[in-house]
Amino acid sequence: MRTWQSVPVCVSLAQASSRAGSPLFTPSLPRGERKMESPERQNSGHLQFFDAHCHLQDPRIVEEVSAVIEEAQSVGVDGFSVNGTSEADWDKVAQLEARFPDLVVPNYGLHPW
C-alpha cells in the first residue's frame, strides 16, 4: 500500500525565479508573437494540433529529439508544451525552447512523485 506524503506540486514564479540559474530569468516571446504552426499549414484549412503535455527533455529520447519533432510535424503537430518535472531538468527544458523557439513552450514544474 502506498502512503502519500504532502508534496508541493508547483512553486510560484517568484520562488522559482529567485533560484540561482533559474531558466525563468530567460524571457519567452510575448503572447501572440509565437508562431506555433508551420507556414505551409497556416490558413490551409487543415486541423492544427498542439501537444499539450510532453517530456521532450526525457533522457530516453533527447538525443533524437529533432527526429521526434520532425515526425510529429509530419502528422500535423505544430507545437509542444514541454513540461519539466524537477529543477534537475529545467535547464534541459530551457535548452529545448532555445533550440526550437517557434515550437516549444516551456513549463517548469515539480512532479509529485
Image (tube, grey):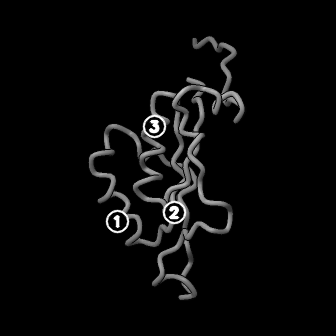
Give the distance between the C-alpha atoms of the residues marked 1 and 3, in whole angstroms.
22 Å
| Element on which disc 1 rests | helix
Q: Residues within 10 Å of mark 1 (few under 14, many from 20)?
A: few
> Looking at numbered disc 1 in the image, what kind of residue is underneath it?
Glu
Residue 37 location, x and y as percent?
52, 73
Q: Which of marks 1 and 3 is in front?
A: 3
Q: Which of marks 2 and 3 is in front?
A: 3
Quick one: label 1 or label 2, which is nearer the N terminus? 1
Residue at position x 48%, y 44% in the image: 94
Give the distance between the C-alpha atoms of the residues marked 1 and 2, in whole angstroms.
11 Å
Give the distance between the C-alpha atoms of the residues marked 2 and 3, in whole angstroms.
19 Å
> Looking at numbered disc 3 in the image, what kind of residue is underneath it?
Asp
Residue 18 location, x and y as percent?
65, 28
Please give the residue where the numbered disc 1 appears in the rendered image: 70
Viewport quadrant of the N terminus: top right
Residue at position x 64%, y 33% in the image: 17
Disc ID at residue 51: none
| Element on which disc 3 rests | helix
Left/right placement of residue 89 relative to residue 50 reads: left
> Looking at numbered disc 2 in the image, what kind of residue is underneath it?
Gly
Please give the residue where the numbered disc 3 appears in the rendered image: 91
Q: How crowded is mark 3: few (under 14 residues within 10 Å), some or many (20 or more)?
A: some
Residue at position x 50%, y 64% in the image: 102
Image-quadrant location for residue 13 = top right
Viewport quadrant of the C terminus: top right
Quick one: label 2 or label 3, which is nearer the N terminus? 2
Q: How crowded is mark 2: few (under 14 residues within 10 Å), some or many (20 or more)?
A: many
Disc ID at residue 79: 2
Residue 14 location, x and y as percent?
72, 32
